[in-house]
Amino acid sequence: MKIVLITTPVLELQQDRLEAPLGLLYIASYLKKHNINVEIIDLSGKPESQWHIPNGDIYGFTTHSTTYERTLKIKDLAIKVNSKAITVAGGAHASALPQQVSNDFDYVVVGEGEKAMLEIATSMPTKSIIIGKPVYDLDLLPYPDYSLVDIHSYYRSLAGKPCVSILSSRGCPYNCIFCNSITMGAHKPIRYRTVDNVIGEIETLKSRYKISSFRFQDDIFGTKTSWLKEFTNKVRPLNIDYRCFARANYCREPEFVGMLAQGGCRHVSIGVESGSSKILEAMGKDQTVEDIREGIIQAKASGLIVRVYLIVGYPGETWDTIHETIDLMLTCRPHEYIVYPLIPYPGTPLFQNPSMYGIRIIDYDFSKYFQVYGNRQAHFVYELGNVSSATLEKMRHYMIERLAELKWSGESNFI
């Protein structure tokens, strides 16, 4: 038996081939551990003329809402190669809309994929929707096997040096209403790899591929103080550089950002979302304006490059709340910023019950559900009460213009 795992290209992005498909690498490595023949076909950055699909008995696809129709096109190509093959859909879109996706695939995996794909490969369950059982002891997972891809074909960088993504944990202790990570079970209790297990992967990547720069892909990095202290002490002798995602309420603590800097962190990304207390509370963000202000100031004081993510159009957004966000950012002055529209992602409360939040979705064309693509482009696919999508567009463009003295995300050496 041979399993072929396929990544769909996102041709709308200016930088589609940033990094290897970490989720598929974890699944493939887990399958290899159980003596299953597996291949990864990463089509990121490749036009249709270069979509070459090998023969396989099972084809697995990571699905995203924005590229779902393209994934179906690739699936059809795979079936032409082997008409008897089994097709499996996983990822965010399949997890959010499993019943709908099951019309197009033999199996749909909801949530984490390692155990579910092994179950499909070894027993072919009679049910078509498989709930992926979480891996609670993450140290039991083998390291992602980069021999399955061309690691040097990706161009994510950190300060101009090649950078590889790594996970130290799975899950998130917070419950932000807008967050699409909920579809993959991210709000389950957070699970950590041991520090030694993470250090072992870093040492492997350094020795095997000469990689010394890393991007921690955790939803939030360093949420456990004892873990971060141990990690900082053990990673310092390795002389690596890294970047991560962190919350403002953590970054406002000098000890926290100090440990990041001591361990080699060069760049931290903070989900600010809004500078309005009203909007933050409505989001369920569990973060205050003062957290944001102090978090950015402390992170900068520690020597970190600070990037912030902002969202325009959450229910309750007005021109006043837009100005609150702009004023806060121009006061704190993060080094980099990016402004997203609110996206009512499938699987989130905003999509499942929009009227409860005063949202009227006007467009179910998921190919428009990008946070940002091309040259800072984005779509508002909904209206808020008396606030039209056109007005929301004006709000976003106005914020971008007012923050132009800061650096737009991506226009730096920290991609």
Image (spheres, rainbow, N blue to C red):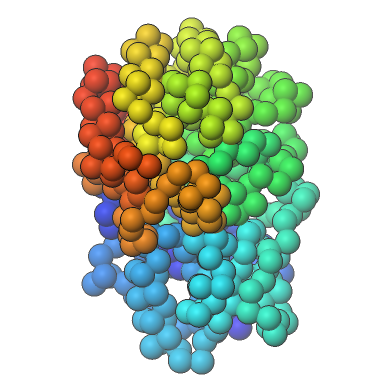
Q: Residue at x 58, y 13 (%)?
A: 252
Percent coordinates x, y for residue 364 in the rendering: 37, 61
| In the foreground, 31 or 405 | 405
Q: Which residue lies furthest to the front in this view?
A: 386
Relative to 400, say whether 125 is above or below: below
Q: Which residue is drawn at 71% across and 69% down?
A: 34
Residue 280 seen in this snapshot:
yes
Q: Which residue is drawn at 44% across and 59% down?
A: 64
Relative to 267, say whether 141 is above or below: below
Percent coordinates x, y for residue 392 in the rendering: 29, 38
Specify the quadrant that holds the N terminus. bottom right
Q: Which residue is drawn at 46% across and 92% down?
A: 83
Q: Residue furthest bottom?
A: 84
Percent coordinates x, y for residue 340 in the rendering: 36, 37
Q: Image quarter for residue 331?
A: top left
Q: Image quarter for residue 95?
A: bottom right
| In the foreground, 104 or 33 | 104
Percent coordinates x, y for residue 415 in the rendering: 36, 35
Residue 162 located left or right of residue 301: left
| In the foreground, 270 or 266 | 270
Residue 212 seen in this snapshot:
no
**Badge count:** 0
